[in-house]
């Protein structure tokens, strides 16, 4: 039986489920008696008494075919025959297939008990909307486990096999109710329920609606990474054989990472001004929620931002109609941030009236703030990402590949190669310390001019970010203040070739590092995950770890088919401790107790960083909110850094 691939967090919370079918296998004992009786009454009331084929029922079906000119109007298959057909035969309707079905039914009856056959049937049967088996159907239609189903709900499920796609309570409630009431009548006629139960169930309305499995941890980028790796390791059967992937993601830290990225990107977007409504439509002369809903029908929420239609606006208020039929009110405080965008450095004046920003017919985004008030919002033009890993073994505990997976499936943590800028300088300083420099070494922070035939004027004149110079500066100060000219002089002193070769010890490939002095300014092309891996060497005492995000894969029986076995940095080894601060460089560290790859860190003058996590937040193209995102993520749920 096909069972979807399930992806869970490290704490067992659902991240995603992949597969064409919904199925939750259950044992016979887990199926309530009322639910069994409903299927037996509807499909095969004599199930426990016939040998696999109901000859009386078959004769009755054959007679009906004869009197109706060869057209089948009544089924004669027992539950055992349906099991034979569903597992071994095609749905083709022919006399040859029917004869094969009989022989298979007899064989199944000889090999399995009646309870085993019924268990197979109730786990295999298609019940509409990709739900296979009673447990999946109960979850989808009613959001319940089997032991929570009421008698009317059991009868509804019992009536679905006849026309699962067309006569289910989501697709056609009226037709499904007719079938449900028939099943209730059959249960009463064969003695499965009493009259008062029958009458009460008959009068009960049905409240079925689609219940998708509740996603407990929002990590869609991780889910896709897990799906790809599972298929790579297990083949296409990974999506159909009921495997369960346990990731290294921590649910609370992932929630904190999501909140940090979204909150700070919205703040960043607001600081850069209002780009205007997403679209504009012409409203009907009279209010018509049906037409309003159609205008919003093709839109979807993005990162918690709900699409809405402005139905009217004035100087003080605007009414916005949402997809769920709710109308929210925006006052001036809710739109005061929406200064018109001019360019990345300029915005227009602060709006003094709501209707300066919102016009009837505008399609906009709204979001609820921490105080429960609705605010005008917009989808940010910039993007951001965040990855957090354990430096001891490389386990990824939080990963956000972008503002919204719905908006963009491009994973900026693993797939994006961008310039890291000044965050690359610690690797250069580590190379310099290995060459004999120390944090107390003094290097001149003064202007530099290099001949460069590729630039106008034939000169390259690098500068500090502030365009100021400190003169002679200790390296500990230069690194803290990110002095470009000091870093350039360091590379010039130790040699570009040596610096390039040295930084590969932090996991970067040589072709990612430019073969010139600009590497001091962070012009390499690396991914955020590579940067986090490199920084982990500083945090763990000088060992190069391999990031990983899957800790175990279990089969449908709960047996592990894959268990991660990462190399771990040695916490108790001497090289993990702060090195001697004498001016002479410390020797390269010996091999660690656990065979992680050494990468110079504390042993070459950089002490281990405090905390248990390495968090990397790349900056968007037109701004620099990473410190804000990092602080938000680390404060939310007290994420260690």
Image: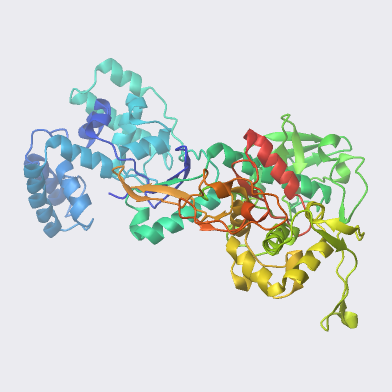
Query: Which quadrant of the view contains residue 114?
Result: top left
Residue 107 pos. (x, y %): 7, 48
Residue 238 pos. (x, y %): 36, 55
**What colour scheme does the image use?**
rainbow
616 and 65: which is toward the camera: 616
Which residue reaches farthest top? 196
- Position of residue 539 in the picture relative to residue 234 (left or right): right
- Position of residue 195 in the picture relative to residue 15 (left or right): left
Q: Is residue 307 at least partly visible in the picture?
A: no
Residue at 24% x, 31% y: name it.
36
- Position of residue 576 in the picture relative to residue 194 (left or right): right
14 and 286: which is toward the camera: 14
Residue at 16% x, 35% y: name it.
115
434 and 461: which is toward the camera: 434
Residue at 31% x, 37% y: name it.
134
Query: Which quadrant of the view contains residue 425?
Result: bottom right
- Position of residue 550 in the picture relative to residue 416 (left or right): left
458 up-or-down from 264: above or below: below
257 and 32: which is toward the camera: 257
171 up-or-down from 235: above or below: above
The total of numbered circles placed on residues is 0
Q: Quadrant of the C terminus?
A: top right
Residue 370 pos. (x, y %): 72, 32
Residue 473 pos. (x, y %): 86, 57
Q: Is residue 247 at least partly visible in the picture?
A: yes
């Amino acid at each position: 039986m096909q069972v979807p691939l399930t992806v869970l967090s490290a704490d067992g919370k659902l991240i995603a489920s992949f597969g064409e079918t919904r199925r939750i296998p259950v044992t016979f004992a887990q199926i309530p008696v009322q639910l069994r009786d409903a299927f037996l009454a509807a499909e095969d009331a004599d199930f426990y008494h016939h040998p696999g084929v109901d000859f009386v029922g078959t004769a009755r079906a054959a007679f009906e075919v004869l009197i109706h000119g060869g057209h089948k109007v009544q089924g004669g298959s027992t539950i055992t025959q349906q099991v034979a057909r569903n597992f071994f035969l095609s749905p083709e309707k022919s006399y040859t297939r029917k004869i094969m079905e009989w022989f298979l039914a007899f064989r199944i009856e000889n090999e399995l008990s009646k309870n085993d056959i019924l268990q197979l049937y109730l786990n295999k049967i298609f019940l509409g909307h990709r739900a296979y088996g009673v447990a999946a159907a109960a979850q989808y239609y009613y959001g319940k486990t089997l032991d929570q189903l009421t008698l009317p709900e059991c009868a509804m499920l019992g009536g679905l096999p006849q026309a699962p796609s067309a006569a289910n309570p989501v697709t056609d409630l009226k037709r499904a109710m007719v079938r449900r009431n028939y099943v209730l009548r059959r249960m009463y006629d064969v003695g499965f329920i009493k009259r008062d139960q029958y009458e009460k169930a008959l009068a009960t309305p049905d409240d079925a609606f689609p219940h998708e499995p509740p996603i407990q941890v929002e990590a869609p980028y991780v889910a896709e990474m897990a799906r790809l790796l599972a298929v790579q390791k297990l083949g296409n059967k990974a999506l159909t054989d009921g495997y369960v992937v346990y990731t290294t993601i921590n649910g609370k830290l992932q929630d904190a990472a999501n909140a940090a990225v979204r909150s700070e990107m919205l703040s960043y977007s607001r600081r850069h001004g209002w780009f205007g409504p997403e679209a504009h439509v012409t409203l009907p002369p009279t209010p018509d929620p049906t037409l309003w809903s159609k205008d919003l029908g093709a839109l979807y929420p993005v990162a918690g931002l709900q699409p809405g239609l402005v139905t009217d606006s004035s100087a003080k208020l605007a009414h916005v109609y949402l997809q769920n039929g709710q109308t929210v009110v925006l006052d001036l405080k809710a739109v005061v941030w929406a200064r018109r965008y001019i360019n990345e450095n300029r915005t227009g004046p602060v709006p003094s009236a709501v209707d300066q920003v919102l016009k009837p017919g505008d399609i906009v985004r709204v979001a609820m703030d921490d105080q429960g008030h609705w605010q005008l919002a917009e989808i940010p033009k910039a993007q951001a990402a965040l990855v957090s890993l354990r430096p001891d073994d490389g386990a990824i505990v939080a990963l956000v590949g972008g503002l919204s997976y719905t908006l963009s499936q491009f994973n900026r943590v693993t797939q994006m190669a961008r310039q890291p800028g000044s965050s690359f300088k610690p690797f250069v300083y580590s190379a310099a310390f290995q060459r004999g420099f120390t944090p107390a070494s003094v290097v001149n922070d003064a202007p530099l001019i290099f001949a460069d035939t590729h630039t106008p004027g034939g000169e390259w004149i690098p500068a500090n970010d502030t365009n100021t110079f400190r003169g002679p500066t200790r390296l500990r100060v230069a690194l803290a203040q990110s002095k470009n000219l000091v870093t350039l002089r360091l590379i010039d002193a130790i040699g570009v070739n040596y610096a390039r070769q040295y930084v590969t010890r932090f996991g970067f490939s040589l072709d990612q590092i430019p073969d010139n002095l600009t590497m001091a300014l962070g012009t390499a092309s690396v991914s955020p995950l590579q940067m986090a891996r490199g920084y982990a060497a500083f945090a763990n005492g000088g060992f190069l770890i391999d990031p990983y995000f899957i800790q175990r894969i279990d089969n449908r029986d709960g047996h592990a088919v894959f268990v991660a076995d990462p190399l771990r940095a040695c916490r108790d080894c001497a090289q993990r401790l702060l090195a001697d601060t004498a001016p002479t460089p410390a020797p390269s560290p010996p091999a660690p107790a656990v065979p992680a790859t050494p990468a110079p860190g504390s042993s070459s003058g950089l002490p281990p960083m405090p905390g248990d996590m390495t968090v990397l937040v790349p900056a968007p193209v037109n701004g620099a909110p990473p410190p804000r995102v990092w602080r938000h993520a680390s404060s939310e749920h007290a994420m260690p850094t």
